[in-house]
Image: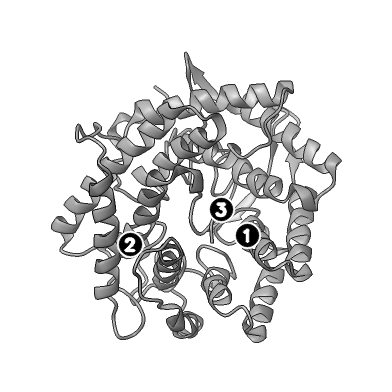
Amino acid sequence: MLFDTERHESLTTTLWQHNIVQKEITSIIDDIEQSLLPNASWPTHPLDAESYPKVGPKWSAYAGAAGAIHALQILRNYGYKVSDLSYLLAAVHSSFVKSPDVSVEPGLQIGEIGILMPRVLAEPDNQEISEHLLNCMEETIDLPLYEITSGQSGMMHAAIALYRKTGEVCWKKIFVKGAKSLMNNWQQDSETGEWLWQSQVFGSKRHYYGACHGIAGNANILLQGADLLSESCIEVIIDRTISTLNISAKKEANLANWILCTKPNIEKLLVQWCHGAAGIVTAMARTPKNDSSNSKLLDGLLEKTGELVWQAGPLIKGSNICHGTSGNGYAFLYLYKRSGDSVWLGRARKFAIHAIEQSQKARLRYGQGRYTLWTGDAGLAIYLYHCLYPDEAAIPGLDLF
């Protein structure tokens, strides 16, 4: 088996209905707004308290107040009636600096960058905040991380988004510096021929494959900045990445997946955004498509990988993006955008209905919502919107700001 059946559950039989999805989005927005605490945070969900046991409010983009506020910014931009809570980000940042809930590194998901980014979006003329964000980005360049949560590739997602929005050269320059750091530390395994980064994230030194800490995630952001890099560099990135994913893929019939990491080998075959099949798809589906052998090889891999996500079914862990049903559903949306095949859109929408039911059951079980971008309802609401309007699909806080 290329997936662990105990991590998945049977898909709901409830049919897709536009009005059910719209109603759930507005319900999530209302719950987030009504549950705001006086200290500019939200009640910590028991599952987040268990995963991130430091006592106190959560502030980061990943599972804290900054992510919830950023999600509301995105939903407001989509036309929903949402209170603009961006003014709270100064207090959130100050609280994080005084008492970091996850990490003291200046990263995108669990550090200062993820808190400052939505503030810069809300206050584009605040030069002091922009300069502070740029300084935090600079601090990631020499870290031995090479991944999204705290490293160069996460920083680069924010940098390129700001460059696209503003045209300011400083954001372009820091993106290119991040790209050089990634390229200079990309190493080939002499035994397997694979090209991997050694990411020293959360204390461990590992060579990952997936979207969050591995080659797929790093290749994704490098290719998003293709116009900022040389043509020869882009060719190298595509060749190394597709070759490595093809060498390392575990295949059975029309399915494909990847182990968690190598050196040391961790043979887990997860099917999530952060690790495994779903994230491989979302990271690689934006790769330029043409008539080359590499492009055809990648399309074949993505097809097999998407089919694996479908056959595995929704994740028991819940409705969230990082390691839940929404994140896996994004794999189908990205495949739909790449191929135009409506089968993938139908599958994304089936996962959306299932995710709604998961979220509602969890709310009854725990007596509260999960007010986070990556692990909870805020991210779910944006995924539901993208199932309504799939041409706009992009993972929030990463491919979408």
Q: Comparing marks 1 and 3, which lies closer to the viewer?
A: 3
Q: Comparing marks 3 and 2, which lies closer to the viewer?
A: 3
Up-down relation of residue 281 to residue 69 (above or below) = above
Q: Earlier in the sequence, mark 3 or mark 2?
A: 2
Up-down relation of residue 94 to residue 285 (above or below) = below
Residue corresponding to mark 1: 151
How far is disc 1 from disc 3 in space, using C-alphas? 16 Å
Q: Quadrant of the N terminus?
A: top left
Q: Amino acid at mark 2?
A: Asp
How far is disc 3 from disc 2 in space, using C-alphas? 23 Å
Q: Secondary structure at mark 2?
A: helix
Residue corresponding to mark 2: 48
Is residue 314 at all visible to an observer of this figure? no
Q: Position of residue 298 (x, y in %)?
A: 63, 27
Q: Which mark is residue 399?
A: 3
Q: Residue at x 41, y 26 (%)?
A: 343
322 left or right, relative to 243: left
Q: Position of residue 157 (x, y in %)?
A: 62, 58
Q: Residue at x 71, y 27 (%)?
A: 290
Q: Position of residue 106 (x, y in %)?
A: 59, 70
Q: Residue at x 79, y 36 (%)?
A: 235
Up-down relation of residue 335 to residue 125 (above or below) = above
Q: Work out whether residue 22 or residue 50 is closer to the camera in this orientation and state it.
A: 22
